[in-house]
Image: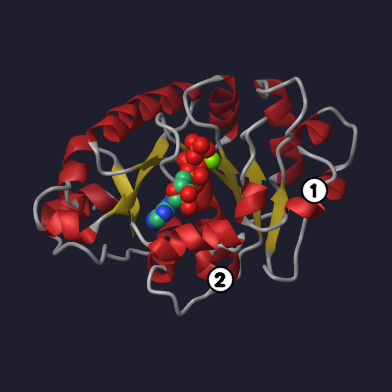
Amino acid sequence: MGKIICFVSGKGGVGKTTSVANVGVALALLGNETLVIDADLGLRNLDLALGLQDAVVYDLLDVSSGVCTTAEAMIHSDKYPNLWFMPASQFKEQTTITAEEMQLVADLVRDTYDFILIDCPAGLNETVSSVGAVSDMGIIVVQPEPFSLRDGDRAAEFIAKAGIQDIRLLVNRYKKELVQTGKMLNILQVIEKMAIQIIGAIPDDDEVLLSGIQGEPLVINQNAAVSKYYLDTAERILGKQIPLTEIQPKKSFFKKMFGK
Ligand SMILES: Nc1ncnc2c1ncn2[C@@H]1O[C@H](COP(=O)(O)OP(=O)(O)OP(=O)(O)O)[C@@H](O)[C@H]1O
Ligand SMILES: [Mg+2]
């Protein structure tokens, strides 16, 4: 049975879609059959992040309403072995997905893939609640700044209420220079503030931004410096205990990170 993992944030624009695309491709590169679902109805972007916008015919709501089969909605490109993509609707009047509709889709795909990553819309709404109800793990994406951390806390409470027990933190876009000069929170300080087990930390890097513009997740280029951070995150999802590169871990840190 596949593991369903949703990517959530309170605040918008923190890097959910970019993270789903890169961590999804990383899991696929590591040999896992992986499905990425865009649940950001009306404001979809995952198709662009993967460069698959021209291949979109059917979408998530077509699957949940029986307009098409799961197989018909699924997009696959030879660029990404082991990866499948189910897009969100863009022009439909319905802009959220109900718990029943999401349950139906989850039941249809769960047994076919090792991992199903779901890109949620920003904010805390019906879609996030419906996705949360079918997810085994929730990844809260934050940037290391106060607004994002506060909203991340709210998001964690929200998906816990939706039924997710395994909640992890992905710190995105930390700037090494600002951390070094004490102007930005370091990863340990973020972990202390959030009190959520961390699953990964991704630096701010223009290559990530550019790969988003080009429509090809950076991690596909395994030589790019930042690819390692996405691959490490994927390995941790697989259960490997890989220390974060950016910190000298203390024993208490390992306890928080791995619960050991
Ligand atoms: N680690 C990173 N380094 C540099 N740029 C990044 C990084 N992660 C994301 N970005 C950029 O930040 C912008 C917002 O990212 P993204 O669209 O993934 O956020 P989001 O949380 O999905 O937004 P929304 O809430 O609107 O759905 C994009 O331009 C993306 O390329
Ligand atoms: Mg997004």
At mark 1, the secondary structure is loop
Residue 20 visible in the picture: yes
Image point (31%, 34%), residue name:
148
Q: CA distance from mark 1 to mark 2?
A: 21 Å
The structure residue drawn at horizontal position 21% and vertical position 63%, both measured from the top left corner, is: 246
The local secondary structure at tag 2 comes to: helix
**Residue 161, relative to residue 237: is it above or below?**
above
Residue flagged by tag 2: what amino acid is it? Ile
Q: Quadrant of residue 113?
A: bottom right
| Residue 175, horizontal then vertical, whole percent | 25, 56
Q: Quadrant of ligand 2?
A: top right
Identify the residue position indicated by label 2 in the image.
220
Where's residue 221, x and y in %? 52, 75
Toward the bottom, the furthest residue is: 223
Q: Which residue is painted at 21% across and 43% down in the image? A: 190
Relative image position of residue 129 (x, y in whole percent): 54, 23
Give neighbour class at mark 2: few <14, some 14-19, many 20+ (Cα, 10 Å): some
- Residue 11 vs 251, above or below: the answer is above
- At 68% across and 66% down in the image, what residue appears? 82
CB within 8 Å, label 1 to label 2: no
The color scheme shown is secondary structure
Amino acid carrying label 1: it is Val
Q: Is residue 45 left or right of residue 148?
A: right
Left or right: residue 63 compared with residue 151:
right
Where, by quadrant of the figure, is residue 250 drawn? Answer: bottom left
Would you call the spot at circle 1 few (<14 residues within 10 Å), some (14-19), or many (20 or more)? some
Mark 1 sits near ligand 2, with its Cβ under 8 Å away: no
Question: Which residue in the structure is indicated by mark 1?
Answer: 56
State which tag comes first along the sequence, 1 or 2: 1
